Amino acid sequence: MKLTLNKMRSDIGQPIAYSLNSGNEAVLMNDYLQKKIEIHWTGNIFCSKCSKKTKRSFGEGFCYPCFISAPEASPCILKPELCQAHLGIGRDIEFEEKHHNKPHIVYLAATDKVKVGVTRNTQVPTRWIDQGANKAIILAETPNRYLAGVTEVALKSFYSDKTNWRSMLRNIEDESIDLIDEKWNCHDLLPQDLQQYFVEDDDVLELNYPVYKFPEKITSINLEKQASISGTLTGIKGQYLMFDEQYVFNVRRHTSFEIELRTNG
């Protein structure tokens, strides 16, 4: 089947269920586990915003004009502390009101170490799954993206805001991490004006990914350098497909790439 890639949809479960969109249909990727599949890039890239064909993908699947103008590609997507939506400033005020002037969550997530992150409250636990977290906890809830970003920045001196994707895919986990303890330590690290957003609920969500075998060594495939990949699908974690030959494929990195997906049973 032919489809244009976007990030995989995930549904919480035991294990998490992953799917790719193909037109009006959902391709359940869990059904392909332990089966041989082939992914072939057709050479086409279609902008995720305007759908026009583009020679290169910028950001997460944009053509260059959309990358520099679309609100979905605004700098505050990666750096929420730069958001000015609360001031009525942005690339698209209607978009900013709908997405950035809404409650946001600051969270702690754990793999081999603890990281701090920000997401819109409607994106929990999707954001945690996309990052391949083994467990996560809500730290604070703010009324907008800017304040969530400021809260994250206040904690960056103590926690990373990046996931070590290689450790995540190898399932290297520090079992000594206690997210509840880490969370309450953060309370005292926050400036007093931000402590009002602290959430006292201590629920920790543990995530179970559909993985039969974690890779020991990792080679990440880039379709622009290698147009076809094939192998037995051994697992899915974060936005990565894992194959039996110790290589992995980042679906989200290839947003807007048109591919042909084949299975040999």
Image (cartoon, rainbow, N blue to C red):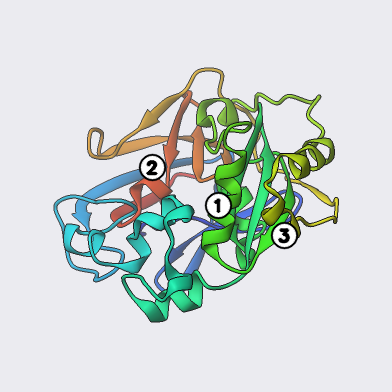
Residue 132 in view of the camera: no
Q: Residue furthest top?
A: 217
Q: In the image shown, does 32 or 255 lie closer to the viewer?
A: 255
Q: Residue at x 35, y 70 (%)?
A: 90
Which corner quadrant holds the N terminus? bottom left
255 relative to 191 in the view: left or right? left
139 relative to 66 in the view: left or right? right
Q: Residues within 10 Å of mark 3 (few under 14, many from 20)?
A: some
Q: CA distance from mark 3 to mark 1?
A: 12 Å
Q: Position of residue 264 (x, y in %)?
A: 45, 44
Select label 2 or label 3 by which is in front: 3
Select label 2 or label 1 by which is in front: 1
Q: Residue at x 34, y 48 (%)?
A: 254
Residue 253 in view of the camera: yes
Q: Which mark is residue 150?
A: 1
Give the mark, 2 or 3, whose residue is nearer the N terminus: 2
Please name the residue that numbered disc 3 is placed on.
197
Q: CA distance from mark 2 to mark 3?
A: 47 Å
- The amino acid beneath tag 2 is Glu
For residue 183, above or below residue 216? below
- The amino acid beneath tag 1 is Val
Q: Position of residue 164 (x, y in %)?
A: 53, 29
* Local secondary structure at mark 1: helix
Q: Residue at x 54, y 41 (%)?
A: 35
Quadrant of residue 37 within the rendered picture: top left
Q: Which mark is residue 38?
A: 2
Q: In the image shown, does 216 or 157 lie closer to the viewer?
A: 157
Give the mark, 2 or 1, whose residue is nearer the N terminus: 2
For residue 87, above or below residue 224? below
* Local secondary structure at mark 3: helix
